[in-house]
Amino acid sequence: MQDIVILALNGLAWGLIIALIALGLSVIFGLLDVINVAHGDFFMVGTVLAWVAVDVTGSFAIALVLVPLFGLLLGAVTERIAIRPVLSTIVLTVVSTHGLGLMLQEGVRATFGATPRRLLAPVGGTVTLPGGVLYDTYRLVAAGAAALALLAFFAFQQRTRFGTWMRAVRHDRETAMTLGIPVQRVQLMTFSIGAGLALLGGVIAAPITTVDFRAGIEILPTCFMAVIIGGLGNLPGTAAAAVLLAVTEGVVSAVLDPSAARIVSLCLMSAVLFLRPHGLFAGARA
Amino acid sequence: MSALSVNRALTLLLLIALVAAPPLLGWMEVDFWLVVLTEILIWGLLASSANLLFGQVGLLSFGQALYFGFGMYGVAIGIDRFGLGLWPAMGLGIAASLGMAAVAGLVAVRLTWHYFAIITVVFSLIFYFLALRLKPITGGDDGLSFAAPPILDWGSLRLTLGDDATQYWFVLLIVVLAFALQARLRASALGRAFAAVREGERKASLLGIDVLRVRWIAFVIAGGLAGLAGALFALFGRYASATHMYYTVSGEAVVWTVLGGAGTLLGPAIGAALLILVREELSTVWEHYPLIVGALTIAVVVFAPKGIAGGWNLMLARVLGR
């Protein structure tokens, strides 16, 4: 029983982090129609930069602030170089982001090295939860931080002018343009925010995963699953699906093993794609 | 002279050069390129299967590695477990990939672009994880190694893959046949139906084309081509492994296709050849050559969105004044 609780909690923490990354993917997809194949690598760069920042400055807090800011910059540069020129033929963005992913992976391998590393959690130790379950403190902190970031993003989108612009462009690009919304700038900023979310996810996840240049290709399918099950472009749906998926996978891996759990969630995803192509939560669109 | 005849003449020259490659490379004392060339042919065939779906029917598949994997395991399991000869094992591999594509296609072709791309990845991931798990059958992570049976064994006439030149000609023969088949397909009524579906689903259905059926046929043929490439790859490496079923392999097929020129017959193979040659040339010089491959990929997409073959055709049309 205790094992199941711990696995479900692990799933929750990991699911909230995945939600953050998948949200970035979904924001980019919903607004630009771009399937960003390099998104997993953005996450990976986040974990690596977190490791480097902690190594250099000794402070996790600095990493938590600086790395997502770098992510915004990385996203903006990417949009200008690899997305905007090919936006008219949308499928080409899959290819250009694939090329970008290759560069990011190899860039990290060339500088950071090919050996996976671990980052020590900034808050160690365990806490006793009700029911006498001992649990990692940092995982709870990570879950909280990811949840907070999700809420902050939704608040940003609902409450600020820029967030309203984002919703408007996603809803109807042409009308938004005639209303004088700077669509190109919104697109740039959206890609930038999407990348920032992925790098932020990377920083939060770094202490509970391995820091490795291959981490991106491993995490990308899970993020896509969350986006699909939640409904393409449906942001709250994506976040909910990520948590649902990770908790299910966590509990199933307790009974079977991780790759069986992955097969279960992939089958779930094909069923969703076929039966409810607009996602499990269609109708709850924000 | 029309653009078509220029391209035909060039294709013929290319074919002659490919057939003559073993003695030529031997004479230049760079025999090692023969193995690279064999690999290029196989990957070019895989890319052409992605191209059939994307370039001709307008469906972006990110799951061709699945059918590639079925062809690969069909050969490996046929030879290693059932003790089949080379040709029956290849038959098994292709039949397995055709069967898988026929079943997966029933579901996949009902969806279009984003959804289609994603369901093809999902299917291929399911079987990738299954292949990892079913260690007794597939060898899991370690893969399956086997000794390749002879291509031909008629008394004194015995051809084996052990000889690099024989192996090359064997692969070349099959790949050329597969491309010839695709060329025929393009000119056929079915090929025109593919184009009609790509250009406008609704218009095509008003013309009396059964869109779902046409898509399904294309999906199965593409699965068979990918399976053939996988079968050849298993024979080439005497090895099958789940790593070649991961979605990154499907992604490469799409990248080669777009780089070479989606929709053209030889574009995908040209794209595969270019990137593999770059890899072979640069990997000896600089360990981190994927940085250049990535940059090159972005550059081609930005500056030559129609790919190499597409760009060539545009240039040809301009030079010939049309």
Image: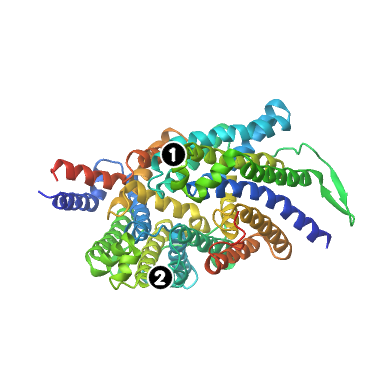
Evaluate whether residue B311 shows in this view: yes
In the rendered image, which residue does mark 2 sit on?
B98
The N terminus of chain A, quarter of image = bottom right
x and y, in percent, of residue B250 in the image:
45, 55
Circle 2 chain: B
Residue visible at 37% across and 55% down in the picture: B47
Mark 2 Cα within 10 Å, few/some/many (few <14, many 20+)?
many
Circle 1 chain: A
* Label 1 residue SS: helix
Q: Quadrant of residue A2?
A: bottom right
The residue lying furthest to the top in this view is A57
| Residue toward you, B184 or A164 | A164
Q: Mark number for residue A82?
A: 1
Q: Is residue B12 above or below residue A282?
A: above
Q: Spatial distance from mark 1 to mark 2, Cα to Cα?
A: 36 Å
Horizontal side of B131 relative to A12 (left or right) equals: left
Q: Is residue A68 above or below residue A37?
A: above
Horizontal side of B270 relative to B97 (left or right) equals: left
Coloring scheme used: rainbow
Q: Quadrant of residue B311?
A: top left
* Label 2 residue SS: helix
Horizontal side of A113 relative to B205 (left or right) equals: right
| Residue toward you, A63 or B81 | A63
Residue visible at 58% across and 45% down in the picture: A24
The residue lying furthest to the left in this view is B1
Amino acid found under the numbered disc labelled 2: Leu
x and y, in percent, of residue B287 in the image:
47, 35
